[in-house]
């Protein structure tokens, strides 16, 4: 839910679950619809990746179509690149904080991202994802939903590159805490070419997200201490199911170690291995619930 919160969307886990089960009385709020759309878009993308469809312009547009299928964004060209000029901040391009490339360059620029992603190269997956994230947000190919889709795409790339086996890493909490810094660094890359500072910030966000996820896997109570009161109603079995699956996913740590250099074996890694052995047989059964659960953290973040 944090990914949508960056954009101003506010809704709780309990509200979303009630909405999805059709038990929430009254007309669904726009926030709930957007959160549900994000869940659907993420599941759609993961399904395509698991079916061995390569990440492509077509898939990105299809995911955008799901993301904006209902609610506030449904009138802003779901699934289609923008046909007009957009801008970030301000009331018009003349006083905007940032003006993306003209509409007639979008297809070509997005094609370059697709080519870069699939080109054989020695860059670690996290570095490649960090570079693509900036380029995608710089192009701003859609009229709405660029921020949410950009963060969703990051997770999807790591799954496709076998760094993650599921949507276990979300950067939106860190981005929300450091929102001003996040946008400032995007601007520094665009106008000064300062990639190094952006990469440092991005990897710090990854380490923060990975550490937080591991802590939750080690101690289910962490979820309730970090959640708002309405989220504390989550059942213990749902938390335990999520922790069981999350604790077995350690490929992310391998990629971080490749970037930062070798590090000594840690208790953290040993505990992950032990939990993986204990829970391997129940992973498939719990995966659907966890994917839906964790993406709620990703959804509450920005209105773009």
Image (spheres, rainbow, N blue to C red):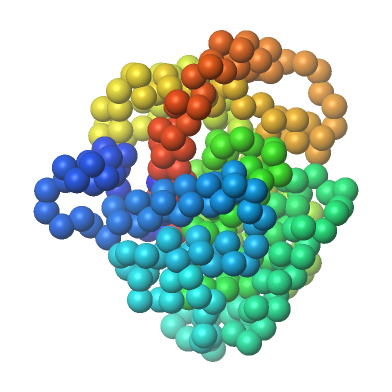
Residue farthest along the right direction in this orientation: 122
> 246 or 208: which is nearer to us?
246
Rendering coords of residue 120 (x, y %): 85, 54
Res. 155 visible in picture: no
Rendering coords of residue 207 (x, y %): 65, 35
**Residue 275 against residue 46 in the figure, above or below:** above
The reply, left or right, for residue 161 in relation to residue 211 is right
Rendering coords of residue 218 (x, y %): 53, 17
Rendering coords of residue 51 (x, y %): 59, 47
> 259 or 74: which is nearer to us?
74
Residue farthest along the left direction in this orientation: 26
How many numbered circles does the render carry? 0
**Residue 83 against residue 71 in the figure, above or below:** below
Res. 296 visible in picture: yes
The reply, left or right, for residue 123 in relation to residue 295 is right
Q: Residue at x 81, y 23 (%)?
A: 263
> 287 or 19: which is nearer to us?
287
Q: Residue at x 53, y 47 (%)?
A: 47
Q: Residue at x 47, y 79 (%)?
A: 90
Q: Residue at x 58, y 14 (%)?
A: 275
> 286 or 212: which is nearer to us?
286
**Residue 109 against residue 35 in the figure, above or below:** below
Q: Quadrant of residue 222?
A: top left
């Amino acid at each position: 839910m944090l990914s949508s919160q960056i954009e101003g969307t506010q809704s709780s886990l309990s509200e979303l679950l009630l909405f999805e089960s059709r038990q929430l009385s009254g007309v669904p709020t726009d926030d709930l619809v957007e959160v549900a759309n994000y869940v659907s878009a993420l599941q759609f993308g993961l399904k395509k990746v698991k079916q061995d469809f390569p990440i492509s312009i077509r898939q990105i547009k299809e995911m955008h179509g799901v993301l904006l299928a209902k609610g506030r964004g449904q009138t802003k060209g779901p699934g289609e690149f923008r046909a007009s000029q957009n801008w970030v901040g301000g009331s018009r391009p003349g006083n905007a904080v940032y003006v993306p490339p003209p509409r007639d360059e979008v297809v070509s620029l997005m094609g370059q991202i697709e080519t870069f992603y699939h080109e054989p190269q020695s860059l670690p997956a996290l570095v490649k994802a960090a570079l693509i994230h900036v380029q995608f947000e710089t192009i701003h190919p859609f009229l709405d939903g660029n921020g949410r889709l950009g963060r969703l795409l990051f997770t999807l790339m790591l799954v496709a590159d076998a760094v993650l086996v599921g949507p276990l890493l979300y950067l939106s909490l860190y981005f929300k805490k450091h929102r001003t810094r996040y946008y400032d660094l995007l601007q520094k890359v665009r106008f000064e070419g300062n990639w190094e500072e952006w990469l440092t910030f991005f990897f710090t966000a990854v380490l923060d997200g990975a550490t937080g996820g591991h802590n939750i896997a080690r101690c289910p109570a962490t979820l309730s201490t970090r959640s708002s009161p309405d989220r504390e109603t989550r059942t213990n079995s749902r938390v335990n199911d999520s922790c069981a699956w999350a604790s077995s996913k350690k490929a992310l740590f391998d990629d971080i170690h490749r970037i930062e250099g070798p590090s000594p074996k840690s208790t953290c890694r040993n505990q992950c291995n032990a939990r993986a052995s204990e829970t391997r047989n129940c992973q498939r059964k719990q995966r659907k619930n966890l994917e839906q659960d964790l993406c709620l953290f990703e959804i509450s973040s920005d209105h773009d």
